[in-house]
Image (spheres, helix red, strand yellow):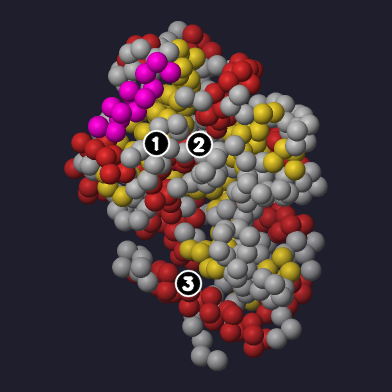
Amino acid sequence: MKSGLSALGLKHPGGVLSNLAPERLCEEIARRGEASFSEDGSVIARTGKYTGRSPRDKFIVLDPETEKNIWWGDVNQPFESAHFDALFERIIAYLEDRDIFVQDLYAGADPQLRLSLRVVNEFAWHSLFARNMFICPDAETLRTGAFDPEWHLVYAPGFLAEPDRDHTRSEAFVLLNFPRKLILIGGTCYAGELKKSVFALLNYLLPMQGVLSMHCSANTNQAGETSLFFGLSGTGKTTLSANARCCLIGDDEHGWTDRGVFNFEGGCYAKAIHLSEEAEPEIYAASRRFGSILENVVCDSEGKVDFDDDSLTENTRVSYPLSFIPNASTDGLGNHPSHIIMLTCDAFGVLPPVSRLTPDQAMYHFISGYTAKVAGTERGVSEPTATFSPCFGAPFLVLPPAYYARMLGDKIQEHGSRCWLVNTGWSGGGYGVGERISIAHTRAIVTAIQDGLLDDTPCDPDPWFGLQVPRQCPRVPIEILNPKDTWKDSVAYDESAGDLARRFNEHFASYEGLAPELQTVAPAVISL
């Protein structure tokens, strides 16, 4: 292992703690005072100033290949190679004579496509997080030294960049260097940066090999049919896929090959705010086990956790191995998707609880990536705000969105996947007027989709969005399926629907040149 670190230029680290198991890592966490523990033994970690990702601090090193391929702009900002080299040398100097934690891991459950990754960092709890979130090699591979890392990820949260000197935007930074096969992260303790930087890496490498990389959860029903769940934070992607009647493949990141789908990860990183045993029993149970990490979740002096306390952040998280979910897949693999479910939390209350999509509509809504932020989800948000994130994951895209959308459309056509839009937001009016669609009804909708009960159900077209709305769904009241029928004021509904349709069109205008054929399925703007 010393020679492995020497390859990075780390010649005299204070101590190298390699591939420690959770028990040993928790001992180190306690001994070093990095975090506390709940009454159930889960780690209670605090991330300090940064309680979420810092997307404006992510950069990609510029070279001839990346210059011509990357989707440059606000999401992917260029960084000069010489500046990277200089910053890297400063980080190595910072880590000299410090204890170093190392985890050798795989990103990707498909043995033919997995990426071997060596994670080098300074905190034991981040080493546990990496071990939770990725896939551990078998003991024999580690014992014999057969593990050969393709990429290195160096994480030094205690190192604060100096923007004038290091050419970063702030003290925090996430840097991807494809020629050197190296990721640098520093200045932030938020563990999600570690996970998502690897996702961004795979979002570049895999499509180049004909594999669609996706920000989605996935499960398989008892008939062996795979479902994908696309959705932004707060739409129910993790909750709906962690279903006791299905086998969970993964909750966040997957690839779709010519053989089927595979999980990128070996763990889950679920939102923990308002987590309850009644609504999300599988995730709740996983969060209360030794080896899980509760990030910025409030805990009292006796170790009692309060999942409803958002005093540190609304973005509380729990990290745990996939094996903590009783019905989780053991190999992280699934068949070609029979069902593709796109989730949106529509706070304007105008989208149907469920609607059927054509392949072109699926591509359109994939590029749109719509949901809505509501008060309390982000500082300064006091009324519903429409949010569009291409491919339901714009911050992690590396290639242009239309590249992924066309791959999705081709695979839908090839494998005959059935596509659906499911609204987990409001009905009977917008936020503050209507009511949130109950999770029981949403679960019933997803069950009906997966059981094929909506495939041949008669549908009515939505006049604004062109969606096919089923007239009935088992265990769901018929009166809520057509959203306009749930509003007391039909004129107010049309005004709100027209406003949202215009927002969709305004967003898609930026991508129309990349996928002009999808303009035919854009929402209609009707004159009232």
Residue at the (63%, 21%) spot, across then down:
30
Q: Amino acid at mark 2?
A: Cys
Tell me the magenta residue range. 85-98
Q: Residues within 10 Å of mark 1 (few under 14, many from 20)?
A: some
Q: Amino acid at mark 3?
A: Phe
Residue at the (33%, 24%) spot, across then down:
92
Spot the residue most to the left: 64
* Residue 316 in view, yes or no: yes
Quarter of the figure that contains the C terminus:
bottom right
Q: Secondary structure at mark 2?
A: loop
Residue 283, placed above or below residue 134: below
* Residue 131 in view, yes or no: no
Measure the alpha-carbon separation of dots 2 and 1: 11 Å
- Quadrant in the picture for residue 323: top right
Q: Residues within 10 Å of mark 3 (few under 14, many from 20)?
A: many
In this rendering, the label closer to the viewer, 3 or 1:
1
Q: Secondary structure at mark 1?
A: loop
Res. 189 mark: 2
- Quadrant in the picture for residue 79: top left
